[in-house]
Image (cartoon, grey):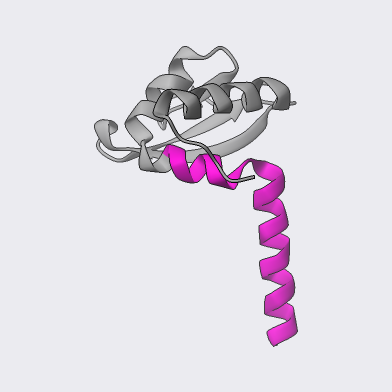
Amino acid sequence: MFSELAQVLQGLAKFIYRSGNPAFWHTAARHADQAYDWFLNEDCWVVVHSWDRQPNTKGFVGPFLLAVPKLGGETVRVYGRSTAEVEESEARFLRKLGVELAR
């Protein structure tokens, strides 16, 4: 049973790692209102609210979930158009916050 649990946790960790930069998303969650505004104003991100129709996100990265306090805690889904654009946008957002992630 322990080995099965370890395999599940290892698979989950791999999924999270492949699905995005965990350190970035941890920072985004701590600054969720600012991150939400950032995603809305950057062309490489698509933000989907609970009331939105699901757009065609084939070929996008994500979804990443973000609980946004200024929306009453609403959780939005965030998709990235391309990995390269997303990584550049993440770096710009972190510079704006004055945050440097450990490498």
Residue plotted at (47% across, 22% down): 39
Vertical relation: 67 (above or below) 56:
below
Q: Is residue 26 rendered magenta in the image?
A: yes
Q: Quadrant of the C terminus?
A: top right
Q: Is residue 8 rendered magenta in the image?
A: yes
Residue 44 % position (x, y): 60, 17
Vertical relation: 15 (above or below) 97:
below
Residue plotted at (57% across, 27% down): 91
Would you identify the image quadrant in which residue 98 lies? Answer: top left
Would you identify the image quadrant in which residue 32 lies? Answer: top left
Vertical relation: 45 (above or below) 64:
above
Residue plotted at (44% across, 17% down): 40
Residue 56 % position (x, y): 65, 22
Residue 8 % position (x, y): 70, 69
Task: Determine if residue 51 is in view.
Answer: no
Give the magenta part as a residue range. Answer: 1-28
Q: In this view, does 49 lie to the left or right of 46?
A: left
Taking depth in this image into account, of 59 and 93 the one nearest to the observer is 93
Task: Determine if residue 17 is in view.
Answer: yes
Would you identify the image quadrant in which residue 89 lies? Answer: top right
Vertical relation: 100 (above or below) 40:
below
